[in-house]
Image (tube, rainbow, N blue to C red):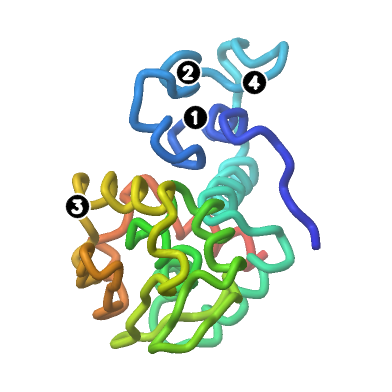
């Protein structure tokens, strides 16, 4: 299976903002974006670089792809499904990305980052409505209950991730019982509840060409 092996901090620097790929490190002053706020490489500090309209669209797509840890083929397929749904394509896309099991697992604090949450899912540590699901791209539906399997509840790293997430607070569309390591995906998030730094319209324009 294809994977993105680029250094995570390098990916954040390339996009010029925090993508929260390294878990708790992203919330400290050790974050690479705060220490070196310019793209990686020998030409990273070069000033007055112009970006075309296509370049802006491409960068936005790459940024969102990296945030959710997806390869191009998988991301394009998700966009195609979003385009076939009723409503606004860009919002449909973001809702589908947020509804992925690995992302919901991350939002509930069962992983310090999306990549760690994806690993938790693949290792059979997550139950959906009482059934074991180990497919990271599984689409969680409103009303679904996501919880940590009994055998994994004593993992120290998982407990640490959950404690940190509880301190920061959970999204409005998730109802969490941190003590029981269980959460309910209440509803699809509204656009106003998602990051304002994402411009999904640029992605729609890119794929519509």
1 or 2: tag closer to the N-terminus? 1
Q: Residue furthest right?
A: 1
What residue is at 29 percent from the left and 65 percent from the top?
191
Residue 97, image x, y percentages: 48, 67
Task: Look at the numbered discs 1 and 4 and tell me whether their residues touch, using CB distance below 8 Å.
Answer: no
Q: Which residue is mark 4?
A: 40
1 or 3: tag closer to the N-terminus? 1
The answer to which of 97 and 151 lies nearer the viewer is 151
Q: Which mark is residue 37?
A: 2
Q: CA distance from mark 4 to mark 3?
A: 32 Å
Left or right: where 13 falls relative to 184: right
Quadrant (top left/top right/bottom left/bottom right) for the N terminus: bottom right
Q: Which residue is mark 1?
A: 16
Q: Secondary structure at mark 1?
A: loop
1 or 4: tag closer to the N-terminus? 1
Q: Secondary structure at mark 2?
A: loop
Quadrant (top left/top right/bottom left/bottom right) for the C terminus: bottom right
Task: Look at the numbered discs 1 and 2 and tell me whether their residues touch, using CB distance below 8 Å.
Answer: yes
């Amino acid at each position: 299976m294809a994977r993105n092996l680029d250094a995570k901090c390098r990916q954040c620097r390339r996009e010029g903002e925090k993508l929260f790929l390294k878990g708790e490190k992203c919330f400290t002053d050790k974050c690479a974006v705060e220490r070196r706020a310019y793209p990686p490489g020998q030409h990273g500090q070069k000033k007055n670089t112009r970006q075309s309209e296509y370049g802006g669209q491409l960068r936005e797509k790459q940024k969102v792809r990296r945030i959710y840890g997806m390869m191009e083929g998988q991301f394009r397929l998700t966009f195609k499904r979003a385009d076939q749904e009723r409503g606004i394509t860009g919002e449909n896309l973001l809702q589908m990305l947020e509804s992925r099991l690995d992302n919901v697992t991350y939002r509930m604090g069962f992983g310090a980052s999306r990549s760690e949450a994806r690993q938790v899912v693949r290792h059979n540590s997550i139950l959906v409505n009482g059934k074991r699901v180990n497919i990271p791209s599984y689409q969680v539906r409103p009303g679904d209950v996501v919880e940590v399997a009994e055998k994994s509840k004593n993992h120290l790293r998982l407990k640490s991730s959950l404690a940190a997430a509880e301190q920061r607070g959970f999204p409005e569309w998730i109802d969490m019982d941190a003590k029981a390591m269980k959460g309910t995906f209440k509803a699809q998030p509204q656009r106003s509840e998602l990051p304002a730094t994402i411009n999904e319209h640029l992605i729609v324009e890119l794929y519509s060409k």
